[in-house]
Image: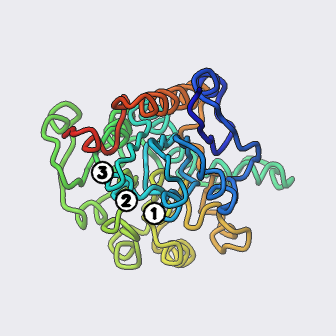
Amino acid sequence: MKPKVYVTRLIPEKGLEMVLAFCDAEVWQGKLPPPREVLLGKAQEVEGLLSLLTDRIDGQLMDAAPRLKVISNMAVGYDNIDVEEATRRGIIVGNTPGILTDTTADFAFALVMATARRIPEACRYVRDGRWKTWGPKLLLGWDIHGATLGLVGMGRIGSGVARRATGFGMRILYYDVVRREDLEEELGLEFVDFETLLERSDFISLHVPLTSETHHLIGTEQFRLMKPTAILINTSRGPIVDPQALYEALKSGQIAACGLDVTEPEPIPMDDPLLTLDNCVIVPHIASASIATRTKMAAMAAENLIAGLKGEMPPHPVNPEVFGGI
């Protein structure tokens, strides 16, 4: 008998085919995440969950799922899962690291370029019929080449953005809890403290996980340290930036602009004041949304799920200690 699993959204075909071939799988068909009561109900009989970052997998859900063996999250981050609670219950958790590094780094740099050169604003200008002639002061933006880029976090994606920035001749500062002297030599990076990075950077790009320490890492005090020409980029998690403080900083001219792939809350409410600002570029959490990358993520999530159902260590475990791993 095939193990019973629940897949919380339609995922790219390659991964879904792998799941359906091995499992008795039910797949939520809606475009929005399954409601909480549906997820709690479906969890009661399953041995495996293939979840997304929009699904809250906590102790209450695990209480409702006595047969649950594995949670496979189709995401790099797993702040939607209570990993400690899963580990205590012997439930293995998998994620999809690495595969989206270059795609997300591409997109972070795309936000740098779009925001600095005011591309979304310029598109609206044309579509609104306001383009009447060429003008020497029309939609002036900020140069990227030769500017100073500050990277908060120097993991896979942060280092990917740094590699792209070298092609634009940018000066690159970084701050991380772990110093990367190997990358300093390879890419010409300068390691600085957090406050110095905020003070000196023309562009600040965030690449840290969401934890209790990084929640609202960027707020009123941090914006006060930035240049009035600074541009903030966030492709990590929305709650790393205090949205009210961001609005005030953008509205008052304390910083020049921002580019957001993620927001708090998510999706952003249509009455959020950030949506009224021309110097705030917001897109719907699509940094990893290339066809190739999402297909690979789905296949990796399926591999993690199937391995856990077999009682094996998934290729990409979050809590290997469940199997006595390090």
Q: Residue at x 45, y 63 (%)?
A: 59
Q: Pointer 1 and pointer 3: residues touching (CB < 8 Å)?
A: no
Q: Nearer the viewer, residue 171 or 9?
A: 9
Residue 195 is at least partly visible in this image: yes
* Label 3 to label 2: alpha-carbon separation: 27 Å
Residue beneath disc 3: 153
Check whether the beta carbons of the residues at disc 2 and disc 1 lie within 8 A of each other.
yes
Which of the two discs, 1 and 3, labels the residue nearer the N terminus?
Answer: 1
Crowd band around label 2 with a 10 angstrom C-alpha radius: few (<14), some (14–19), many (20+)? some
Query: Outermost residue toward the front?
Result: 1
Q: Is residue 115 above or below residue 214?
A: above
Q: Earlier in the sequence, mark 3 or mark 2?
A: 2
> Is 120 situated left or right of 108 in this image?
right
Quick one: 70 or 283, which is closer to the camera?
70
> Disc 2 marks which residue?
85
Percent across and percent down for residue 112 are 49, 47
Give the crowd class for mark 1: few <14, some 14-19, many >=20 residues within 10 Å.
Answer: some
The residue where tag 1 is placed is 59
Residue 294 in percent (x, y) is at: 57, 31
Say if residue 169 shows up in the picture: no
| Residue shown at the point (48%, 77%) measured from the top left | 245
Q: Quadrant of the N terminus?
A: top right
Task: Name the amino acid, label 3.
Answer: Gly
